[in-house]
Each structure stands twice: as structure tokens, then as C-alpha cells.
Image (cartoon, rainbow, N blue to C red):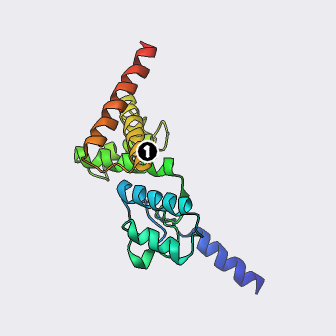
Amino acid sequence: MRTLTLMVMATLLSLPALADDGRVYNRHDESITARQLADAVAAEKAVEKAGVAPESQAAAAIRINMGQSPDKADAPNDNAFTSEGELLTHKQAAKRFAAIEMMARAGIDPDSERAAQIRAAAQGKAETADGEPVNEQTVEEMAKEAAVQEAMIYTGTEAGSPNETLIRMGADSMMDKIKSWWD
């Protein structure tokens, strides 16, 4: 029996791992946007402020009142996960949203070398998975976009709103200030 168990484990370990697709998922294994995560974070803050138990009917009512669907309001939904189910911090999720946003705005093919550079920069790596060095400008753009996405998550700002414009202006100003320190 022990030999069979070892053979099964060896076979499972030799299977190729599923590649993480770079998106962010909720606890229901649904791909989500930064806005959806921000809404869930806001709903959980409201539940906490109300002082009710997170799994209670009152908490579910608060979540539903804040726009979550009734079938998902039974438990907190403010966590973010990878496609493989690994828990992400909100900062890590913001970096993923930033990479997705950068690629979408520029019309970059997700399978291109440029996309690989953006994903590597989002993870704070100096090289892509293929060993190519990450362009310095890509790192700067990624840092700025990650800051924007993180601010949007924490403030609940809608994409395309005047508040997003203000956040982007602030990020541009801060990046210029940081660059001036090294000039």
C-alpha cells in the first residue's frame, strides 16, 4: 500500500502545474475587477462598523444593501485569490490589476514579450520568466499604475470617474518628485 501511495504522489508531483493567469478572483472562483474588490472591502467595513457577526443574517443584509448578490452575501467576500486559489493581499491584487490595466490600455497581447515584462515588473522582478531583463520604464509605469489601483481599491473609486483622474494626477506628481531626487 505504501508503494502505491508513493507512486501516486510521484505521478501527481510530476504533473505540470497550472499556470497562474495573472487575474484576481473572489472566494467563488470568479474573476473580479478592482472596483468589485473595492465594493466588497467597503461592504465588509460597513459590517464591521455595524458590529454584527460576519456570518450573520444582519451582515448578509448589509452586503446585499451595498450591492452584493444575495447568493454571495452569506460570508465575507473581500479576499482576493490567484487562479490557483492562493490568497492575495490587497497590495498584491492591486499590482495584478495594474498589470491588467496597463495591458488593456495599450492593447498588449497577453502572450507577448511586453506583457511578460509587465507581469515581471508587477511582481517586482528584474527579469521575465524567460530571463529577459525588465525595461526600466516598464518598472516605473508599473509602480505608478499599482499605486493608482491600490488607491482606487481603498477609496472605492470608479474607473473613469473624476476621482480616478485626481488619483492619476497625484501618482504622476509623486513619480516626478521621486525621479527628481535622483537627477
Q: Position of residue 138 (x, y in %)?
A: 36, 34
Is 11 left or right of 101, judged from the image as shown? right
The residue under the point 40% across, 59% down is 39
Is 2 left or right of 49, judged from the image as shown? right
Q: Position of residue 23 (x, y in %)?
A: 40, 58
The residue under the point 38% across, 51% down is 156
Q: Quadrant of the C terminus?
A: top left
- Out of 100 and 49, give the one closest to the viewer: 49
- Out of 62 and 98, give the one closest to the viewer: 62
What is the quadrant of residue 178 in the picture? top left
Is 136 left or right of 59, judged from the image as shown? left
Q: Position of residue 124 (x, y in %)?
A: 49, 39
Amino acid type, callout 1: Glu
The residue under the point 50% across, 47% down is 91
Work out whether residue 80 can be spotted.
no
Q: Which residue is mark 1?
A: 150
- In the displayed structure, 59 sits above or below 94; it is below
What is the quadrant of residue 149 in the picture? top left
Work out whether residue 144 can be spotted.
yes
Q: Position of residue 84 (x, y in %)?
A: 50, 65
- In the displayed structure, 26 sits above or below 139; it is below
- Out of 72 and 90, give the one closest to the viewer: 72
Q: Residues within 10 Å of mark 1 (few under 14, many from 20)?
A: many
